[in-house]
Amino acid sequence: MKFLYLPLMLLIFCQFSCASKSSETFVYFGTYTKGSSEGIYVSKLNSETGALSNPELAAVIDNPSFIALHPSKEFLFAVVEASGDKAIVCSFAVSADGKLTKINQQPAKGDAPCHLSVDASGQTLLIANYNGSNCASFPIASDGKIGPGNYYKHTGSSVDPRRQKAPHLHSINVDPANKRAFVADLGIDIIVVYNMGPSRATLTKHSAISLPAGGGPRHFSFHPSAKFAYANLELTRQIVAMSYDSERGVLKQLQVLSTLPQGAPANGSTAECLVHPSGKWVYVSNRGHNSIAAFSIDQNSGLLTMVEVESTLGKIPRGFGISPDGQFLIAGHQMSDNITVFKINQETGALENTGNTATVNAAVNVRF
């Protein structure tokens, strides 16, 4: 019996140990480094309690305001939001403890690169340059190294004399079919659709959708079905629901709603827009109002109904992230240096404060 007892105990220990390890997920925070921040920080999220470990410096880098992980999770990419030759995109190798080792970099060739994404094949890195009037695509080698980029220029302007005298590309995302890239241009109130070439590192303009004048489309997020997509309008504090014809590669506007509660002062701006992994809800952060608006999604029509507007318990929630299992939303704050963790009600989509917090200076992006 002793010989049977020992293997049984080892099996139970192994199962418990594996379960404990799998209950933790790495969370990365992109920051602005004008204050005490030194670059990209990493923490561990307990997927059962929502607790965050004390964030640690993962890599020293200037103004990594937006980051993205490779599908393999072996590499992480970051923009350096700067001007001139200092505006670059960097590649890092991810170690077992979550720390990052720089692999290489490429020029952004546009001031203030502010967003990037990786296609589903892991072969292409895409960036948007806010002040460069352009976006770019870079090949990614099997070792994570970024190759020379291809650059695509936008032209035009819109109605806001302060923010829309020229193109300001603010995000670039790939559709679920991994065939097209979608660029939200705040400066000209347009989302441009690009076809991705066979090599996936080349883009060709395919179509475009004009959104409400003066709205300033900032970020963009697909519904898992690929039938619908959502974009936040930064300047007018709104969200736009769109249908998507994947065969024709065409977006169509369905609905425009405010992201603020009724009676709230019409000031501030929106920042992040993310669809929940289940496709049931979409969330938008409100800077100034310091909140996140939650909307339910009609699965047949794609239309939205506001669920709530929840305080993020911090100042200027520029970026937030939703855990891969859809259980938690983590909000970073640019001006109050705190990270807050919310439990997502799986029935209603409402956010419930867990009381779990962490400290990161000028956190502006959250990715798992």
Image: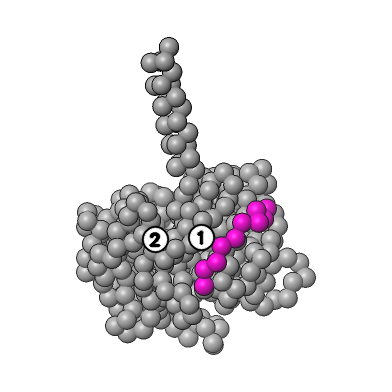
Against 298, is 216 above or below? Answer: below
Q: Which residue appears at 66% of the width and 43% of the height?
A: 347
Q: Secondary structure at mark 2?
A: strand
What amino acid is at disc 1?
Answer: Asn
Q: Which residue appears at 69% of the width and 61% of the height?
A: 309
Front residue of 130 and 69: 69
Residue at the right extreme of this rendering: 263
Do the residues under discs 2 and 1 have CB atoms within 8 angstroms? no
Q: Which residue is mark 2?
A: 68
First of labels 2, 1 by sequence position: 1
Label tally: 2
Front residue of 276 and 101: 101
Q: Which residue appears at 49% of the width and 80% of the height?
A: 35
Q: Of tags 2 and 1, which is closer to the observer?
A: 1
Return the x and y of residue 179 as percentages of the image width and height.
34, 53
The quarter of the picture where the C terminus appears is bottom left
| Secondary structure predominantly adopted by residues drawn in magenta | strand
Q: Which residue is mark 1?
A: 54
Front residue of 201 and 154: 201
Q: Is residue 104 left or right of residue 241?
A: left
Colour scheme shown:
one colour
Quadrant assignment, res 305: bottom right
Bounds of the magenta segment: 352-361
What amino acid is at disc 2?
Answer: Ala
Return the x and y of residue 42 as percentages of the image width and height.
44, 60
Can see residue 39?
A: yes
Q: Secondary structure at mark 1?
A: loop
Q: Is residue 27 magenta?
A: no
